[in-house]
Image: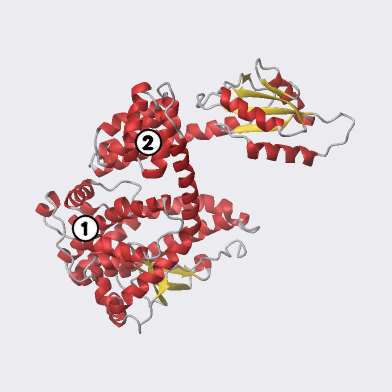
Amino acid sequence: MLRGLQVRLEPPGGWPVTREQAPRLFALLEELRGSLNCQPFHHVHMVSDLNAAVVQIPRLGIFGWHRNYLVLGLPLMASLSPEEFRAVLAHEFAHSSRGHGRFGNWLYRVRRTWAQVIGQMARQRTRWSWVLTKFLDWFWPKFSGHTFVLARANEYVADACSVRLVGAEITGRALVRVRLDAALLGEKFWPGIFTRANDSELPPADVMAELLQALQGGPTETDGARWLRQAFLQQTSNADTHPCLRDRLRAIGRPAAELDSPAPPPPLGTSAAEYFLGPEVPTVAWQLSREWQNAIRAQWQERHVQARKLAEELAASTSPDAPPGAKQLWEKALKLVNLHGDEEALPVLQQVLALEPQHAGANFILGRLHLKTDDVQGIDLIETALRADPLLTEDGCGLLYAHFNRTGQRDRLRPLEHRVDQFRQATALAQQERNQITAKDTFLPPEMEPDQLALLRKVLASEKDVASAALARKEVQHFPHKPRRVLAVRLAVPWWKPRMGSSDRKLVQMLVAQIRLPDPCLVFVARGNLKPLGKKVYAVPGAVIYERGK
């Protein structure tokens, strides 16, 4: 049991800050710790998130003996006034308070510890973890479910601590400001940063300085009004441990007029970052920028290579003598979406729908684009896409769920949850159906595009051991529009010549690495115990797609 619980939890990242570097910050921490009777912090780390958190790393797994980290986001400090930042810190400190809501806070910490341990065990999968797997599969859902409501109630208790220390007005202003700045970074700043990968091979070296400047400028009046309206229309759902903004403001006693006609917070003035970190702000920003740059470098460069390839393909494409069809337009639209975003592809997507009104992909992207601004046209477009391709159900319902939640249409959320549950059940059955392929199954002709067949034949011809190949579709009940294809291969090796099973596996691996089909394909060598399956595939009319020498 002890071996099974040996889980290594890594401390949070970020840049350590000392008392000598930020005396005002540490004076505030000592003041709040004394007021709320909190445990001491062993480390204070600055990170690049718009967040603050108390992170407890249990040195003995679920048995505790925690090392406490206070994680402070430089963007959070830059977006709040000193008093608003004090309110946010009071909220986080309340979760580790030993004097206020002791039992609730203890259970809150136990819940987070279990979540950390179980998540790490799932990633580690040591040879001893199986000892506890069965118990955890039973225990964790029950424990998490029973403590869910208490975890939400704990958020109200923590907000009450903020009100007691700084007042309801400042606490409410901090909650609103954080929500607006989160939307600014999520919808405007970070997407704009990542589009630079189209032209630049390396990520920007001073991203935190740019982020601080964006926060200082704030959202435009139009964006700010939209995000504020969305924030106040959202309602708390059964998936949220954190209550919605309206519920939190109501709980701390903000007047009804403020909830019905919310106003944006006043201009910031001196930020908490400037007040508590002083001249250390540029240093911290530079260090966090370097950390972000190193973490994102590989992904950024991969994106840059992909973007260059897409740009070259777009530039090389020329208008044919005849007008392009829906397929060609859709391929162009996808390249534009991947390069520049949904808006850039809007004219091409409209051309696709003019030729093929039920096109799943075009309807989905246009619907996503409309729902981004809560335009109700997006609902019908998404529903059309889901009818055309049910495999888009989970992503489409996620977009609809976010839209209905932002616009306060709570009565439309539960049907979407049931719809996703049913889709996941059907997906599990479909996966099981596609994973089990035997000679008893019914197989149908492959129905492949000529250009795809030509590429497949080219791959098969490149392997000298392949004598012939047959391609067929397994008849499936779930999502029949998404076929499960199988490729049976017969060898050009004499029957009397010895051949190891490892040679067959190597051949299959090489073929799988080269084959590019629109749907997953099972490749196998029709020998040994797979010979009956191969015979069944070869018997399908039109299945034989390649024969060496023909």
Q: Is residue 32 visible?
A: no
Residue assigned mark 2: 396
Residue assigned mark 1: 176
Residue in the image at 71% along x and 34% along y:
462
Q: Is residue 408 visible?
A: yes
Q: Mark 2: which amino acid?
A: Gly
Rendering quarter of residue 157:
bottom left
Residue in the image at 35% along x and 70% along y:
285
Q: Using the numbered discs, state the Cα–Cα distance from disc 2 to disc 1 in whole angstroms.
A: 29 Å
Q: Pointer 1: residues within 10 angstroms few (<14), some, or many (20+)?
A: many
Q: Is residue 54 left or right of residue 243?
A: right
Mark 1: secondary structure: helix
As drawn, the label of residue 192 is none
Q: Is residue 465 left or right of residue 307?
A: right
Q: Pointer 2: residues within 10 angstroms few (<14), some, or many (20+)?
A: many
Q: Nearer the viewer, residue 500 or 457?
A: 457
First-in-chain label (2 vs 1):
1
Q: Mark 1: which amino acid?
A: Val
Rendering quarter of residue 367:
top left
Q: Is residue 166 left or right of residue 26?
A: left
Q: Quadrant of the N terminus?
A: bottom right
Rendering quarter of residue 268:
bottom left
Image location (x, y in percent) of residue 88: 27, 66
- How many marks can you see? 2
Q: Quadrant of the C terminus?
A: top right
